[in-house]
Image (cartoon, helix red, strand yellow):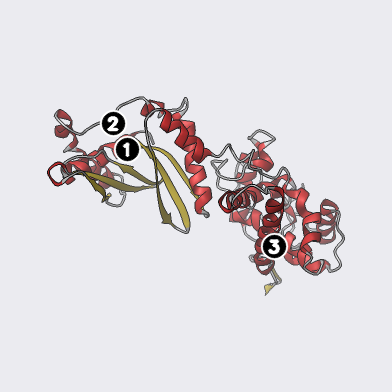
Amino acid sequence: MKPHNPRKRGPPAPDNPVALPLPGFVADREEAAARVERLLRYQFRDRALLEEALTHQSFTDGGAAVASYQRLEFVGDAALGLAFSNFLFLTNPTLGPGALSTLRAANISTEKLARVAVRHDLYPLLRRNCPRLDLLVGQFIESVKQEPEDDLGTVPFGGNIVKAPKVLADIVEAITAAVYVDCKFDLEKLWKVTRWLFEPIITAETIDEQPVTALHELCQKHGKVAQFKTWQKGGMTVVNVFVSGELVGIGSSGQKVIAKLNAARDALGKLVGGANQQVLTTRVGNGLGDEIGELRECKQKLNEQCIRKHWPKPIFKLEKENGPAHERKFVCSVQVETQRGTFVTIGDPISRVKDAENSAAQKMLEVLLKL
């Protein structure tokens, strides 16, 4: 590929060279539009819609602002959601609204649509001027190439250690909207033109065998209970899974249902032949006897570690109280924010709040040792 010519419209090369190859750019806009039309087997009445769909907000023409895909992406997100709603409703007559919502979310998640963009090599068609974006997309593309070939179009969420850049999903939604507007908002026509892009479509049989249900069934076999704790962080939903007070799975997503699925799948991987499989066979500690003496130093040790690492101070929270007044048990959690993410652990039920906090701190120290 020839070096980028700054006089042509397209992304400039980054200032610092990187090991990963950067995505290319199709400077010939007629060729870019023709590629999309060949891909869709659809000829646009108004090609200006397609050029708008292939323009990032970072791009300018001689310093002047140019219409970007943002408006089309807004319409495409809604049109794609409705098209999949119709399809899933008609092809799954026995599924309830919850299962249908999960299937729709999986099929139009950022992760799934980003893989659609990678599979069909759409990013080089985008006009942009954002070297940082090129680096992020390049990292994602290279990481996807290391996965099994079948995963490229089927992984709906959390299948990659490199987060899927939203711009890739935006391109798919913007192109979808361009077709939708061009065919006079004919939803049936839109589905006929674009459906095959999303193949293989995720079905009730292929959605990772419902990891939440599988996790609960696995825990029940061993007399355990899986608990999910959810909170919001930076516009993302984060879910932690606990079994016997041990943190065994973490998941995140912009959508709560997908974050929970991510966390359940992560937990299953660690409980079945993974690092945390012993959680299913060990007894839950009661926090009595000599253990209390050891626990009472854990909160202090955790605070000291956070200070050394320049992390925010741990946040302790009383989760619940159980038992009659004369045999009260307290369960506490602790949250620690590190450079690698936010972690939460839940302690064992103990008769004193301070000891319950130390129990949570002990489990957090164990988690941090594994980082």
- Secondary structure under tag 1 reads loop
Q: Amino acid at mark 1?
A: Gly
Q: Is residue 288 above or below residue 356?
A: above
At label 3, the amino acid type is: Ala
Identify which amino acid the numbered label 2 is placed on: Val
Task: Tell me if label 2 and label 1 are in contact, CB under 8 Å.
Answer: yes
Q: Which residue is at 62% across, 59% downward? A: 130
Q: Quadrant of residue 279?
A: top left
In three-dimensional space, the C-alpha distance between marks 2 and 3, rounded to whole angstroms, equals: 49 Å
Q: Which residue is mark 3?
A: 79
Q: Which residue is mark 2?
A: 284
Q: Position of residue 178 (x, y in %)?
A: 76, 64
Q: Position of residue 333 (x, y in %)?
A: 29, 46
Q: Find the distance from the CA under tag 1 to the CA under tag 3.
A: 43 Å
State the image coordinates of residue 5 (x, y, percent, origin top left).
Answer: 74, 58
Left or right: residue 11 compared with residue 97: right
Give the residue drawn at x 68%, y 51%.
88
Say if mark 2 contacts mark 3, CB within 8 Å: no
Viewed as shown, does residue 339 lie left or right of 358?
Answer: right
Residue 61 badge: none
Label located before the other in sequence (2 or 1)? 1
